[in-house]
Amino acid sequence: MARTADLAQNGHVRHVLNQDNVRNTATTKNGYHNKILRNGTGAGPLPRRKGEDSFEQAPMHVAVLTYIGFGIVTLFGYFRDFLRAVRLEKCHVAQERDEQKDFVPLYQDFENFYTRNLYMRVRDSWNRPICSVPGPVFDLMERVTDDYNWTYRLTGRTIKNVINMGSYNYLGFAENNADFLRTVADKTSEYGVGVCSTRQELGNLSIHEELEKLVAEFLGVESALTFGMGFATNSMNIPALVGKGCLILSDELNHASLVLGARLSGAMIRVFKHNNMQSLEKLLKEAVSSGQPRTHRPWKKILILVEGVYSMEGSLVRLPEIVALKKKYKAYLYLDEAHSIGAVGPTGRGVFEHFGINPLDVDVHMGTFTKSFGAAGGYIAGRKELVDYLRTYSHSAVYSSAMSPPITEQIIRAMKCIMGTDGTKEGFNRVRRLGENTRYFRSRLQEMGFIIYGNRDSPVVPLLLYLPGKVVAFSRTLLAQNIGVVVVGFPATPITEARARFCVSAAHTRPMLDKVLKALDETGDLLRVKFSRRRPSSARPELREETDYEPDG
């Protein structure tokens, strides 16, 4: 089996995660080293800070009104449950039959309270059926309800040219341009649509290996492994990297796939405050000094789980400081770049390029192809020993069907376009245009007086609405103006922080963005959701604290 840690040249620690935890001359038990290694800079530029995340607090009266709003809706929910109980109102939800009342219930009445009484009142703001390519604009199938959102029926009418502000189509590769998709059509004719086998059996195609070499080259690492599903890339690979006797330090705002993977691993999980380096270092110190509970034996591994761009906050990971802490305490770093790969960095290579971090300083690179590449699936990249280990021990690699050939070719053609190896500057122009659109859209929203979260370079733009009644009104009002947005509320966000989440795309033209901004300005005045008390961004203390951790030069 491969060694757990191996000393590399140029001041870098080579980490290979496996289950052996063999001790070598450079690294002993977790957190204790025989040698003190300086944080080398490798071949890349010095790490740098770029932009600050904004988390402005709403006025106190907004929070109070938000709680009052939820309280009123909850009271009406209990009243309607009473009416259903005495059969004055029809109950649409699944429930136990009378003859099954002595059995263990399949449907927990209290657990469904929120869905039954709150979500159903605003359900029309989600799951809207589209009938076109989800590009910068899309066509929407009109639907109506006759029973207050419990069921829908299609009218047969199509709402044309709705501006798409919700899809993760960051670089505009979700397209149906026949010239751009010619190679995808050719590969479909050559290989078909499905593989009907796992990679380890008869599903390992030449284009799969071509894609993995391309991903490794794109990221500047030794090797890569691709998977057919982005969610499973996290949830099925983390259990292969850590297990019982290991410790996971997870950011409190990590995606559900990271949370599920951590729970499935059987490792101990501890959560640190979002992007808070003091909170993270406190947990690292405790882990190294105290070891495992009861036995106080050293942890077999300490794995830090973070995202590049946080999909609900629009914030960027504080990668230079986390890398410095990781090296200081000899932990491993797992970086999920689902929303940042292709969308962040001068050439779209993600947050490590954005901050000028050597890619070898990140032990496990993870990303998905479902967003910037307009396809499906995900990847794990890093040291060759790590990837070879996962080929054998990852459930997603061993048991899942191989990636569809046309999907594989779509990723290859998009990645070559971004890298410029297709002989054009189209990819470079898309990355540049995305950055320009993002900064323009964010700056205009701030000028209008909205509270928005995140980093100025993040294409995920959360606009805070707070009050539950205004969330659905916001979505319906914009749809009436042919603008499709995603609104999010509790339990996906804190109860007082419901929001609309915009995803900016390189495919958006300036007239499109201006139309959206004009509609937002009018809607903001109509609904009175311009809560910002200052134009410059401000930091929310519990989410953003200053630190003096900087990697050594």
Image (cartoon, rainbow, N blue to C red):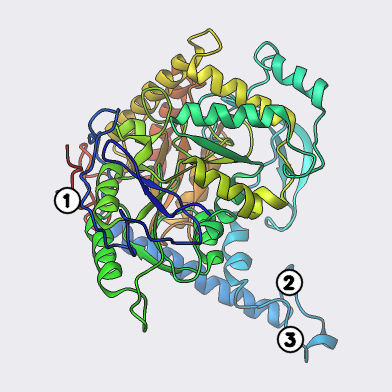
Q: How far apart are marks 3 and 1 (CA)?
A: 52 Å
Q: In which quarter of the image is the C terminus?
A: top left
- Of tags 3 and 2, the one toward the viewer is 3
Q: In which quarter of the image is residue 536?
A: top left
Instruction: Say whether disc 2 or disc 1 marks the residue closer to the N-terminus.
Output: 2
Q: Mark 1 points at which residue?
A: 547
Q: Which amino acid does label 3 sit on?
A: Val
Question: Label 2 neighbourhood size at 10 Å, few (<14), some (14-19), many (20+)?
Answer: some
Q: Which mark is residue 91?
A: 2
Q: Residue at x 64, y 31 (%)?
A: 209
Of 165 and 366, the residue lying toward us: 366
Q: What residue type is labelled 1?
A: Thr
Q: In which quarter of the image is residue 408?
A: top right
Q: Distance between the residues labelled 3 and 2?
A: 21 Å
Indicate the position of residue 419 as horizontal and vertical percent values.
48, 19
Task: Look at the picture and state if 103 lies above or below 91.
Answer: below
Q: Name the residue under label 3.
A: 104
Q: Is residue 278 left or right of residue 317?
A: left
